[in-house]
Amino acid sequence: MSRHFDRERELQRLIEASLAPALPQVEVVDVELDEPREAVRLFIDQLEGVGFELCAEVTELIRPLCGDRSIEVSSPGMERPLRAPATFEAVIGEDVRLRREGVLRARTARVVSVDPEEGVTMLPVEGDEYVVPFDEIVRCRLVVKDFFAAAEKARGAKKKGLA
């Protein structure tokens, strides 16, 4: 497991397993390893929202998994990270900024469809549709243009259990 992405996903699995017994309502949205700064960034969410007390509790629960790295825990915000097929399904028709393995620059494109086996079908501003397999996605975030509409949509998705 030499790839940075693989190390992040493995740490995310460990963190999810560690949090589940104590905080089953908390969703681990994403984990980022900032190796030069020796830091772990953890984005969490729950239906009731994310406050300081929850971030502090999560920090203490995951400290044994993070070694000497500094830990930053926060809400994913409006431009939330996307990883799992269900998170992409919730944003079909929306624009995202996606960076693929082996590609330095992220591209903005619209999510057209999602196939859990094949990946995400994207439509760039200029060009044809293309499919990105999930295992090639290094980073992806929702691009929010209208924050009020996005907030309403996020509340609706949380109530349905999609986000």
Image: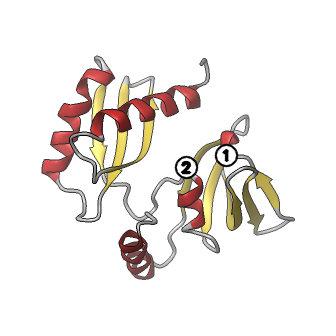
Mark 1 residue element: helix
Specify the farthest residue to the right. Answer: 128
- Using the image, determine if residue 67 lies above or below residue 132: above
The residue shown at (76%, 65%) is 124
Percent coordinates x, y for residue 38 in the rendering: 37, 23
Residue 134 - label: 1
User: Position of 100 compared to 61: left or right?
Assistant: right
Image quadrant where residue 67 sits: top left
Q: Which residue is mark 2?
A: 83
Up-down: is 150 above or below 72? Answer: below
Give the quarter of the figure containing the N terminus.
top right
Labels 2 and 1 touching (C-beta < 8 A): yes
Is 125 above or below relative to 24? below
Q: Amino acid at mark 2?
A: Arg
- Residue at point 41% right, 65% down? 78
Identified at 30% across, 33% down, the residue is 18
Question: Residue 46: horizontal and vertical position, in percent?
Answer: 29, 58
